[in-house]
Image (tube, rainbow, N blue to C red):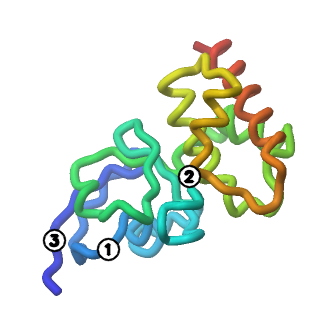
C-alpha cells in the first residue's frame, strides 16, 4: 500500500511522516510517535478513551484517519502539563479521586479540556452533556464531574 506524507503538530512537536492512508490518528499517536497516554478502548468511537484535541476540538482518534489530520495541531494527555506542573484538570482528577483504574482518565481529561477551553463557565449540565461520549466502567461519574467543575473554577480564577 502506498504511503502518504503527513505533517502533524503533536503537543507542539512537528512530525513529518509517511503513513498508510488506512492508519487512524490513534495508531499514529501510539505506535508511530510513541505517546501511549491516549488509549484504545472500543475502536468504534463509543467509549471516548482515545479522545484528543485537534485544532481545539475534542476528537475520538480511533475514528479519524491520520491523513485527515495533516497540517493540524493535535494535543494529547502528554501535552497538558507545562513546566513540570500538572494542568488544573489533571490535578483535580487526582485531588477529587476522579479516576479508578485510570484507563479512561486521559479521554475524560482531554474532552473536559476542549470544553473548558471553549466555555470555562460551563454548568454541571453542560459538563455532563459534553462528557456523554466518554465511558467509565469503574466509577459513578460523580467524582469525575466534581473534578471538572473544580478545575473550571481554577481556570476561571487564572484567566
Q: Secondary structure at mark 3?
A: strand
Rendered position, 11 above or below 37? above
Residue 44 visible at all: yes
Q: Nearer the viewer, residue 132 or 114?
A: 132
Instruction: Using a 10 Å C-alpha cutoff, classify the residue at mark 3 as few (fewer than 14 neighbours), some (14 to 19) or many (20 or more).
Output: few
First reached walking from the N terminus: tag 3 or tag 1 = 3
Residue under the image location 85 percent in, 38 percent down: 96
Report the mark closest to the observer, 3 or 1.
1
Residue under the image location 56 percent in, 36 percent down: 113
Separation of residues labelled 1 and 2 (CA atoms):
21 Å
Q: Quadrant of residue 48?
A: bottom right
Separation of residues labelled 2 and 3 (CA atoms):
26 Å
Residue under the image location 28 percent in, 54 percent down: 69
According to the image, label 3 marks what residue? 4
Residue 121 position within the rendered picture, expressed as x and y whole percent measured from the top left: 61, 16
Q: Secondary structure at mark 2?
A: helix
Instruction: Using a 10 Å C-alpha cutoff, classify the residue at mark 2 as few (fewer than 14 neighbours), some (14 to 19) or many (20 or more).
Output: some
Report the mark closest to the observer, 2 or 3.
3
In the rendered view of the protein, which quadrant contains the N terminus?
A: bottom left
First reached walking from the N terminus: tag 1 or tag 2 = 1
First reached walking from the N terminus: tag 2 or tag 3 = 3
Residue 82 visible at all: no
According to the image, label 2 marks what residue? 78
Q: Nearer the viewer, residue 155 or 59?
A: 59
41 relative position to 7: left or right: right
According to the image, label 1 marks what residue? 23
70 relative position to 152: left or right: left
Residue 40 position within the rendered picture, expressed as x and y whole percent measured from the top left: 55, 69
Amino acid at each position: 500500500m502506498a504511503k502518504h506524507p503527513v505533517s502533524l503538530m503533536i503537543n507542539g512537536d512537528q512530525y513529518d511522516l509517511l503513513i498508510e492512508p488506512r492508519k487512524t490518528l490513534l495508531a499514529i499517536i501510539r505506535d508511530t510517535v510513541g505517546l501511549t497516554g491516549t488509549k484504545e478502548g472500543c475502536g468504534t468511537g463509543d467509549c471516548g478513551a482515545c479522545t484528543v484535541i485537534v485544532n481545539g476540538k475534542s476528537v475520538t482518534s480511533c475514528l479519524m484517519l491520520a491523513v485527515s489530520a495533516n497540517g493540524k495541531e493535535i494535543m494529547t494527555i502528554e501535552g497538558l502539563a507545562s513546566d513540570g506542573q500538572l494542568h488544573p484538570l489533571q490535578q483535580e482528577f487526582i485531588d477529587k479521586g476522579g479516576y479508578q483504574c485510570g484507563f479512561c482518565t486521559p479521554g475524560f481529561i482531554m474532552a473536559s479540556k476542549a470544553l473548558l477551553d471553549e466555555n470555562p463557565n460551563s454548568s454541571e449540565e453542560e459538563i455532563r452533556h459534553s462528557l456523554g461520549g466518554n465511558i467509565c466502567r469503574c466509577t459513578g461519574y460523580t467524582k469525575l464531574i466534581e473534578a471538572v467543575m473544580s478545575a473550571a473554577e481554577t481556570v476561571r480564577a487564572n484567566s
